[in-house]
């Protein structure tokens, strides 16, 4: 996933930012689906995994911002913590996918994803406790909002993102991570 | 071609065409804030009157300006119905099984769809009266202060302007894929959370594949035309804002302020 040209990375990131606006609209036809299925997280994680940490960071910041401006979702009150959370997802995903090389695509993806999902939630929780909801934030509120409400979304991300990356590789829309292994298989 | 392409620039010499892109983008943000801030009948009447005036001032065919709304009308209808039937309001007007039609739900549905329609028209007005290169240069100019902390503003401006132009196309494709999956038996409205989640699985993968295919085509076209890095590109010299630009900014700021005062 490192052979993409700079132009292609930019345009893929642009598509992911566009999807940060469009995908939640598809999900928001179900009440509270945004908080349960976390659709905006998927393009950000993909952008980090495919294009690298800097593009993941841009997607994590620009995606929710553009979505709030164009559709009012997420509401302004949730925007700062969401910006922190998604920015961390994009950065950590992008860094780890370059650092972790186990010769197995899915292992690399899952390690990067799980660590990014945890890091994003921890940093967003710290930001909530220290900045956005200082004095009125608890461990229970953090667990509730980041793990209990959104568990279907976490499962969806863990099931979908490796599938999407694999499908994109099969469609030759992104370069294979381990081309030799794919050829021998 | 039966319809005008969504968001494509249409040459002209109207008042909107002549405004500087930086002023137009700033006005767009102010008017979006006004739309999102509207909470009463008079609030919506004000933004509706503003957008109608802008449509007249743009000299664009009304059909072209509202094209993105027409193209996703089914999608908007679904959003309206879902909000109206699943909103957990108190004043329930009628109930059928899992569906509860409430006054709050109908209001919420109209508010969500109304905001979306108005913002889509505003965005379309910007892209139909401004060249993509002007939008990119203006965005770059507006985020230029970030350069002080090492942000590559040229690349960021290109990415954001391409993202904005991608949105109507992605919306159309999402609607198409959703309809296809409904025809194949997807149950987006199921009461069971697991069934709902499962119904979205076949929706998400095709959306990503089709978006990445579009990104691939666009990046290949850009590279074939010699595009390399945004920072190496030359750009036209920036013209200072004209009195008309300042007038437009003041009027939009006033509209935004009135909305906030009415809301407060």
Image: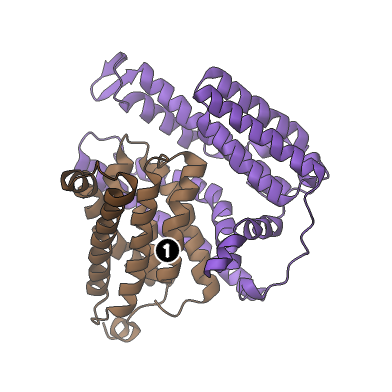
Chain colours: A brown, B purple
Q: Residue at x 32, y 34 (%)?
A: A31
Would residue B166 be seen by someone viewing this image from the given angle? Answer: yes
Estimate the x, y position of residue A143 in percent, counting from the top left.
18, 48
Q: Residue at x 27, y 54 (%)?
A: A126
Q: Nearer the viewer, residue B220 or A12?
A: A12
Which one is in front, B238 or B208? B238
Using the image, determine if residue B235 lies above or below residue B185.
below
- Packing grade of label 1 (10 A; few <14, some 14-19, many >=20) is many
Secondary-structure class at tag 1: helix
Does A59 sit left or right of A102 as displayed? right
How many numbered markers are drawn?
1
Q: Where is residue B195 shown, x and y percent of the image?
A: 22, 42
Q: Residue furthest front?
A: A135
Query: Horizontal and vertical percent for residue A33?
Result: 31, 40
Residue B14 shown left or right of residue B118 in the figure: right
**Chain to which mark 1 belongs:** A
Image quarter of the C terminus of chain A: bottom left
Residue on which the image places disc 1: A57
Q: Is residue A6 above or below residue B81?
A: below
Q: Residue at x 58, y 58 (%)?
A: B162
Q: Is residue A93 above or below residue A85?
A: below
**Quarter of the image where one finds residue B85:** top left
Evaluate whether residue B218 shows in this view. Answer: no
Q: Position of residue B161 (x, y in %)?
A: 59, 56
Determine the residue positioned at 66% across, 35% down: B252
- Outermost residue, left side: A140
Frontmost residue, B142 versus A67? B142
């Amino acid at each position: 996933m490192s052979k993409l040209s700079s132009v292609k990375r930019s345009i893929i990131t642009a598509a992911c930012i566009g999807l940060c606006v469009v995908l939640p609209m598809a999900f928001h036809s179900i009440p509270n689906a945004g908080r349960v299925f976390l659709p905006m997280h998927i393009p950000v994680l993909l952008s980090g995994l495919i294009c690298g940490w800097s593009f993941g960071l841009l997607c994590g910041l620009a995606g929710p911002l553009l979505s709030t401006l164009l559709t009012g979702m997420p509401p302004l009150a949730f925007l700062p913590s969401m910006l922190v959370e998604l920015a961390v997802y994009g950065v950590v995903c992008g860094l780890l996918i370059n650092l972790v090389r186990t010769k197995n695509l899915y292992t690399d993806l899952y390690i990067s994803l799980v660590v990014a999902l945890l890091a994003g939630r921890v940093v967003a929780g710290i930001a909530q406790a220290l900045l956005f909801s200082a004095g009125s934030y608890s461990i229970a509120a953090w667990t509730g909002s980041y793990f209990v409400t959104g568990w279907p979304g976490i499962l969806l991300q863990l099931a979908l993102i490796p599938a999407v990356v694999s499908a994109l590789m099969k469609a030759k829309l992104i370069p294979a991570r381990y081309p030799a292994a794919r050829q021998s298989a | 071609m039966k319809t005008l392409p969504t968001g494509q620039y249409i040459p002209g010499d109207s008042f909107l065409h002549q405004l500087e892109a930086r002023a137009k983008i700033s006005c767009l943000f102010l008017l979006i804030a006004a739309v999102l801030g509207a909470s009463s009948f008079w609030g919506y009447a004000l933004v509706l009157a503003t957008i109608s005036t802008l449509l007249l001032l743009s000299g664009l065919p009304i059909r072209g300006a509202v094209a993105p709304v027409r193209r996703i009308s089914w999608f908007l209808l679904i959003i309206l119905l879902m909000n109206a039937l699943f909103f957990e309001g108190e004043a329930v007007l009628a109930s059928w099984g899992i569906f509860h039609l409430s006054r709050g739900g109908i209001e919420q549905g109209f508010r969500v769809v109304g905001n979306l329609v108005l913002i889509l028209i505003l965005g379309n007005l910007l892209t139909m009266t401004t060249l993509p290169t002007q939008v990119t240069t203006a965005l770059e100019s507006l985020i230029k202060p970030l350069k002080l902390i090492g942000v590559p503003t040229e690349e960021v401006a290109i990415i954001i302007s391409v993202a904005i132009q991608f949105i109507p196309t992605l919306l159309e494709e999402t609607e198409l894929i959703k309809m296809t999956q409904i025809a194949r038996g997807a149950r987006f409205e199921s009461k069971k959370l697991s069934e709902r989640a499962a119904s979205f699985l076949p929706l998400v993968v095709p959306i990503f594949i089709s978006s990445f295919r579009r990104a691939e085509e666009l990046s290949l076209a850009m590279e074939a035309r010699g595009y390399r890095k945004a920072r190496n590109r030359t750009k036209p010299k920036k013209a200072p804002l004209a009195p008309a630009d300042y007038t437009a900014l003041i009027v939009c700021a006033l509209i935004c302020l009135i909305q906030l005062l009415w809301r407060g």
